[in-house]
Image (cartoon, grey):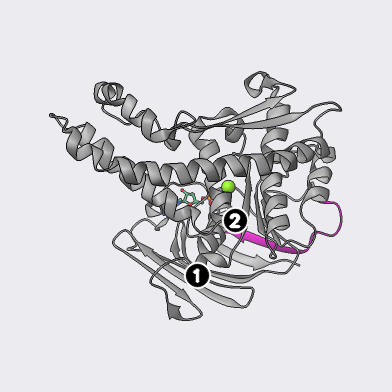
Amino acid sequence: MLSTLKLRDFRCFPALEAEFAPGSNVIVGPNAQGKTSLLEAACVLLRLQSPRAATLGPLVRLGAAGFVVDGFYSGNHLQFYYSPRRKKLALDSVEQRTAAEYLQLGRVVWFSNADIALVRGAADERRRYLDFVAAQLDSGYRRHLRDYEKALRSRNRLLKMPNVRWREIAAFDEPLVAAGDALTQARARLVATLEPYAAEAQRAIGGGVGEMLSMRYEAGSGGTDFAVNLAARRMEDQRLRQTTVGPHRDEVILEINGHGCELASEGQQRTLALALRLAQARLIAAQREALPLLLLDDIFGELDPARRNALLAHLPAGAQKIITTTHLDWAQTEIGRVFHLENRVLTVER
Ligand SMILES: Nc1ncnc2c1ncn2[C@@H]1O[C@H](COP(=O)(O)OP(=O)(O)O)[C@@H](O)[C@H]1O
Ligand SMILES: [Mg+2]
């Protein structure tokens, strides 16, 4: 569990310290007080990435050079300093040259009121969803993703040059295909593993009787042979000045009873987004010895009581939770430690 969290120059906070309890922690506060930022900091400390920003630059407090997140997680001291020019990581006060060992520790699942974008949004939302959990289940995944993105950026840069030089471009095809094949396989496996968890969660949190959720992975590499497809698309790549096949075009198709979710009602789409997050939580809990830290950002106020209770009942038992909310009206009885956050100050209420 995450027992302490300290921030410096993170988002709106010049400095902040929190001590969390096992079980549930609820942070109550009006809008724009930094509730989401506080959860984001917990995620960055454990996973070195933000669930809501593609890069860490915007997390540095305006006017500051860099941020620090620091905390104790299951007895391990984690420290991360980030500035656009320099990153520093320490595990139990020992500076780390790579993130590999550090990232072995923390498991996180992020639930947010913006999750409906997983269902309604563009395909990159669903790829990010897969990547976030894949990196926590398979320590090699992050490296494949990095290698792929690097080769893709280089290739696309060359495709944008006034004279397209295929000999130079082709030098990136091999690393692109190697990393791309690894991503394709890992994502296909992951979607197949997630599907039963998601379908079960969908039923549990109020998909009507007989509603069957299915998830299908559609490889952007064109299926069978990425290298062959890449070679076959050269003219197209040159015309469009970008790489047009590969895992950066992957899609996850979500269907209810065989129908695409764009036609589903808003309520169904929200239930589905919640089911996708619950599936991550249940999968991590099932595959790892450690339970994930559950970060639930402002989702309870919006759910009807039936779905709220179903959600709470379906979260992995015993997992630590940090929940943000603007009001506690929804909470019935035992909700654990309650904090109040206002004017950048966090106080423990009970
Ligand atoms: N890098 C930053 N530097 C300074 N302030 C920031 C930064 N990023 C976000 N903020 C501000 O932090 C405040 C808190 O945001 P947020 O965590 O979303 O609040 P809440 O979830 O409580 O509504 C907002 O007013 C936002 O403008
Ligand atoms: Mg918020």
Residue at image mark 1: 101
Quadrant of the frame with the C terminus = bottom right
Who is closer to the viewer here, 173 or 333?
173
- Secondary structure of residue under mark 1: loop
Q: On screen, 73 above or below 47? A: below
Q: On screen, 97 above or below 205? A: below
| Amino acid at dot 2 | Leu
The disc placed on residue 294 is none
Who is closer to the viewer here, 286 or 296?
286
Magenta residues span: 331-344
Whether residue 335 appears in magenta in the rendering, the answer is yes
Taking 210 as reference, is 235 left or right? left
Who is closer to the viewer here, 271 or 127?
127
N-term-proximal mark, 1 vs 2? 1
What is the x, y in percent for residue 86? 31, 65
- Secondary structure of residue under mark 2: helix
Q: How far apart are marks 1 and 2 (CA)?
A: 14 Å
Taking 337 as reference, is 119 left or right? left
Residue at image mark 2: 137
| Amino acid at dot 1 | Glu
Q: Is mark 1 within 8 Å of ligand 1?
A: no
At a point 43% along the width and 46% down the height, the residue shown is: 54
Instruction: Determine the image quadrant of residue 270.
Output: top right
At a point 80% along the width and 38% down the height, the residue shown is: 205
What is the x, y in percent for residue 154? 26, 42
Quadrant of the frame with the N terminus = bottom right
Whether residue 283 appears in magenta in the rendering, the answer is no
Direction left: furthest residue: 163
- Contact flag, marks 1 and 2 (Cβ < 8 Å): no
Using the rendered image of the protein, determine whether residue 344 is visible from the camera's viewpoint.
no
At a point 70% along the width and 40% down the height, the residue shown is: 274
